[in-house]
Image: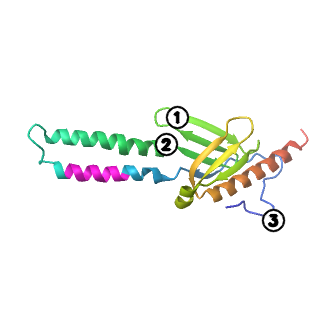
């Protein structure tokens, strides 16, 4: 996914000195393969609850079974899903924003115009899942790790393009007479 180009092969850019709107390019979540265990737990709890309902020994009652099943589903299915769902990377034309957290939200930004190095790392399991880890470092702050990103090579290419275009625009706008 690259920038649209004009006749000379250069990216389309706004006229010098005009403000450019910040556009959303992609919203990226880590790969959902970690939810596989949650899905298996949900299936096992549903099966066990259906099997043991009305078949419990004397001191136990059905409400105890349902309460235990609800606690297991809440802790091992709903909570991991909420954590996965709350972790998102927002890629715009000006910056990359990481937001994570269910109750307390943490937010971190990297501006494309400042520039940063991008490293792509893929292990054996990540290759099987079609994911990768992107390491973004601007040399000042701690590196931003984008773990288990689906289609990581494409995301890497888009990030490189956005850094290049943003730096070109920032340099060009810095050359304008004030």
Residue at the disc numbered 2 = 86
Residue 27 image offset from top left, x and y in percent: 57, 51
Crowd class of label 3 (few under 14; some 14 to 19; many from 20; radius 10 Å): few
Q: Quadrant of residue 154?
A: bottom right
The relative height of residue 58 versus residue 11 in the rendered view (above or below) is above
Check the image and name the residue furthest to the top: 104
Q: Does the residue at mark 2 contact the one at mark 1 (Cβ under 8 Å)?
A: yes
Residue at the disc numbered 1 = 105
Q: Does the residue at mark 1 contact the one at mark 3 (Cβ under 8 Å)?
A: no
Q: Quadrant of residue 114?
A: top right
Check the picture and name the quadrant holding the C terminus. Answer: top right
Check the image and name the residue furthest to the right: 177
Residue 100 image offset from top left, x and y in percent: 53, 39
- Depth check, front residue: 116 or 27: 116
Residue visible at 64% across and 49% down? 134
Residue visible at 46% across and 50% down? 34
Check the image and name the residue furthest to the left: 58
Q: Give the structural element (helix, strand or loop) at label 2.
A: helix
In this figure, which colouring scheme has been used for the structure?
rainbow
Check the picture and name the quadrant holding the N terminus. Answer: bottom right
Residue 173 image offset from top left, x and y in percent: 84, 45
Which of pointers 2 and 1 lies earlier in the amino acid sequence?
2
Q: Give the structural element (helix, strand or loop) at label 1.
A: loop
Residue 166 image offset from top left, x and y in percent: 76, 48
Which of pointers 3 and 2 lies earlier in the amino acid sequence?
3
The relative height of residue 62 versus residue 128 in the rendered view (above or below) is above
Residue at the disc numbered 3 = 9
Distance from Cα at disc 3 to Cα at disc 2 = 39 Å
Q: What is the magenta segment's predominant secondary structure?
A: helix
Magenta part of the protein: which range?
39-50
């Amino acid at each position: 996914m690259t920038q649209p180009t004009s006749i000379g092969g250069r990216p389309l850019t706004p006229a010098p000195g005009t403000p450019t709107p910040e556009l959303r390019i992609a919203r990226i979540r880590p790969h959902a393969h970690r939810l596989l265990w949650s899905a298996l737990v949900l299936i096992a709890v549903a099966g066990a609850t259906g099997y043991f309902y009305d078949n419990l020994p004397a001191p136990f009652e059905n409400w105890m079974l349902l309460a235990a099943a609800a606690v297991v589903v809440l802790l091992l299915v709903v909570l991991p899903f909420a954590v996965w769902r709350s972790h998102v990377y927002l890629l715009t034309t000006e910056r990359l924003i990481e937001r994570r957290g269910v109750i307390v939200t943490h937010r971190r930004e990297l501006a494309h115009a400042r520039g940063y190095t991008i490293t792509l790392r893929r292990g054996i399991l990540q290759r099987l899942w079609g994911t990768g880890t992107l390491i973004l470092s601007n040399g000042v702050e701690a590196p931003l790790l984008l773990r288990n990103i689906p289609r990581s090579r494409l995301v890497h290419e888009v990030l490189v393009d956005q850094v290049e275009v943003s730096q070109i625009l920032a340099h060009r706008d810095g050359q304008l007479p004030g």
